[in-house]
Image (cartoon, helix red, strand yellow):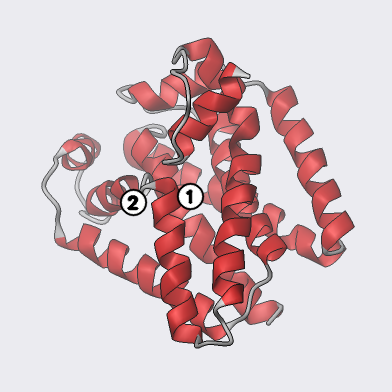
Amino acid sequence: MNSLLLAIQFLTRLPLPQETEFNEKEAGKSLFWFPWIALFMGVVVGFVNNFFYDVGPLFAAFLGLITWYLLNGGLHMDGLMDTADGFLSNRDRDRVVEIMHDSTIGVFAVLALVLVLLGKFSVLASVAIQPVEMGIFFASARMGVLTAIHFFPSAPASSMGNFFKHGASKNSYYLQWLILAAIILFTRGKSFLLFPVAGCLWGAVFSRLSVRKIGGLTGDVYGAITEIGELFMLLLFGVFFS
């Protein structure tokens, strides 16, 4: 139970009635809950967007996006922005890491923030997405992050990356795949298996880039994988399923 509470505390801004013990062992166990918490948040966002869609698509998209970031507190945006500043700077490895650790916001960070938010808003305003579909998108994007955690090395200087990775269990990862596949087959059919597959491929591709750029993955990179992965899921749906 402590691992579930830890995952809720880490991924959301939902108030909890008790303090949770934050250690390496519990952090590893908490990874099991990541897709299911993401699925829940996606269902809530999808419900808000779908409920107000007939009132006005733009209004519904705005409320959906507000709900999205109220739930997660913009947790991954900082990672997206730091990663964009570092990776797009075209500098050597040490300088890229230094830029990522710098609290100053650069041009690439602002561009990444604006483009991701506009991309999500555009899809939400263009397509009526059912709550269960949005939940699948959120969970699929989270599976991309778990792929990165389980199968790619953390950067030497990454305290957050190492913290979660040391307690991670590949058996838990495979179980998550089975559960998510069962949910998808039961609710939407085999065509929607495209989303977790695409999410994991995205996580692997960006992870390989990160290994080449800075020698591994960091908490910021995990955030970038999540934010862009969520946008990727929405774009896939808009192109192939709308």
Mark 2 neighbour class, 10 Å CA radius: few under 14, some 14 to 19, many 20 or more: many
Question: Which is more toward the observer, 155 or 139?
Answer: 139
Q: Is residue 95 visible?
A: yes
Query: Which mark is drawn over residue 77?
Result: 2
Q: Position of residue 104 (x, y in %)?
A: 11, 47
Picture residue at 56% right of the left edge, 82% below the top: 53
Query: Which mark is drawn over residue 226?
Result: 1
| Amino acid type for the residue under numbered disc 2 | Met
Picture residue at 87% right of the left edge, 56% below the top: 185
| Residue 96 appears left or right of 80 | left
| Residue 51 appears left or right of 19 | right
241, above or below 89, in the image: below
| Amino acid type for the residue under numbered disc 1 | Thr
Mark 1 neighbour class, 10 Å CA radius: few under 14, some 14 to 19, many 20 or more: many
Q: Secondary structure at mark 2?
A: helix
Earlier along the polypeptide chain: callout 2 or callout 1? 2
| Residue 204 appears left or right of 187 | left
Quarter of the image where the N terminus is located: top right
The residue most toward the left is: 104
81, above or below 238, in the image: above
Q: Position of residue 100 (x, y in %)?
A: 22, 41
Q: Quadrant of residue 89?
A: bottom left
The residue most toward the front is: 17
Q: Quadrant of residue 65?
A: bottom left
Picture residue at 49% right of the left edge, 78% below the top: 60
Picture residue at 34% right of the left edge, 40% below the top: 220
Alpha carbons under labels 2 and 1: distance apart: 9 Å
Q: Is residue 233 visible?
A: no
Query: Which mark is drawn over residue 113?
Result: none
Question: Which is more toward the observer, 201 or 4?
Answer: 4
